Image: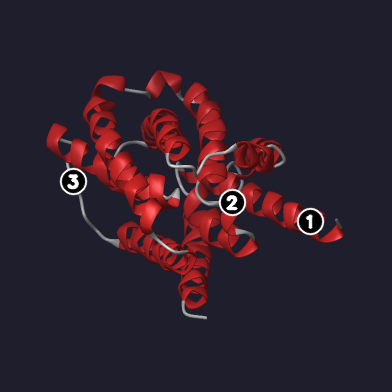
Amino acid sequence: MAELDHTVLLAMGIIFLGAFVQSAIGFGLAIVAAPLLFLVSPDYVPAPIVMVALFNSLFNAYKYRNNIAIGGLKMAIYGRVPGSIAGGVLLLYVSSAALSLWLGGMVLLAVLISLLPLRFEPTPNRMAVAGFFSGFMGTSSSIGGPPMALILQHQDASSLRGNLAAFFVFSSIISLIVQYFIGYLTWQHFVMTLPLLPMGWLGYVAAQVVVKYVSKQWIRIFTLVLCSASGLTAIFRAFS
């Protein structure tokens, strides 16, 4: 039982860190948490992280509700549906080691995307493509933020956080539906998620306080370093 309690406490701490990052910069919960939680227990990936992401996104969407442009997200949500189905199909055929490798690769890809000096205008076609890959990555690994963040990254901070949060609300629900039908969302996953939800909220609250005193650039640098380390760890685990 002590080992179980230690595992749960470790998972709670990881979720707190991921929720803090997401609330501070607009995305990053799964990028930070997924590889680390997979090391704690593969059962935490992907459904429990997606449930926490949904919970956390509801807070951010409400806070930035005046900055959300639902019309601009429509094509991304349409693209998310087939992408989520494709991600669900992938889950049916990958082993635990392959999933660890996939998680690590997705995290390193997210870091690379964050460093690229690219600028994409959010046209309807690009939003649909970003939505598809967000669905594919988010359903299979819980890491669905990078494609959308790449498209929306040049919006002002409030619009970025609001639109990403609104998209994550819809997309998390879609991913959970797909995961349920392929057996990756069960009652056990729901029970595992319950202790994590308060930490998602505390991470959200802590971010609202800390961002007033700490540069978002420093938070971003810390996040990229942490993500790189966790991504490489997941890849090494796949070959161990």
The residue to which callout 1 is attached is: 4
The residue to which callout 3 is attached is: 120
For the residues labelled 1 and 3, the Cα–Cα distance comes to 45 Å
The answer to whether the residues at label 1 and label 3 have Cβ atoms under 8 Å apart is no
Q: Residue 175 or 112: which is nearer the viewer?
A: 175
The residue type indicated by label 2 comes to: Tyr
Q: Nearer the viewer, mark 3 or mark 2?
A: 2
Q: Is residue 75 at least partly visible in the picture?
A: yes
State the SS at label 1.
Answer: helix
For the residues labelled 1 and 2, the Cα–Cα distance comes to 13 Å
Q: Residue 36 or 117: which is nearer the viewer?
A: 36
Q: Nearer the viewer, mark 1 or mark 3?
A: 1
Question: What residue is drawn where x is 52% and y is 73%?
Answer: 233
Q: Position of residue 85 (x, y in %)?
A: 31, 40
Left or right for 54, reference 137: right
Residue most extreme to the right: 2
Left or right for 82, reference 199: left
The residue to which callout 2 is attached is: 44
The answer to whether the residues at label 1 and label 2 have Cβ atoms under 8 Å apart is no
Q: Position of residue 190 (x, y in %)?
A: 63, 37
Q: Looking at the image, is mark 3 or mark 2 earlier in the sequence? A: 2
Q: Looking at the image, is mark 1 or mark 3 earlier in the sequence? A: 1
Question: What residue is drawn where x is 36% and y is 45%?
Answer: 88
The answer to whether the residues at label 3 and label 2 have Cβ atoms under 8 Å apart is no
Choose top left, top right, bottom left or bottom right for residue 116.
Answer: bottom left
**Is 173 drawn above or below residue 70 in the view shown?**
below
Pointer 3: residues within 10 angstroms few (<14), some, or many (20+)?
A: few
Question: What residue is drawn where x is 43% and y is 32%?
Answer: 177
State the SS at label 3.
Answer: loop
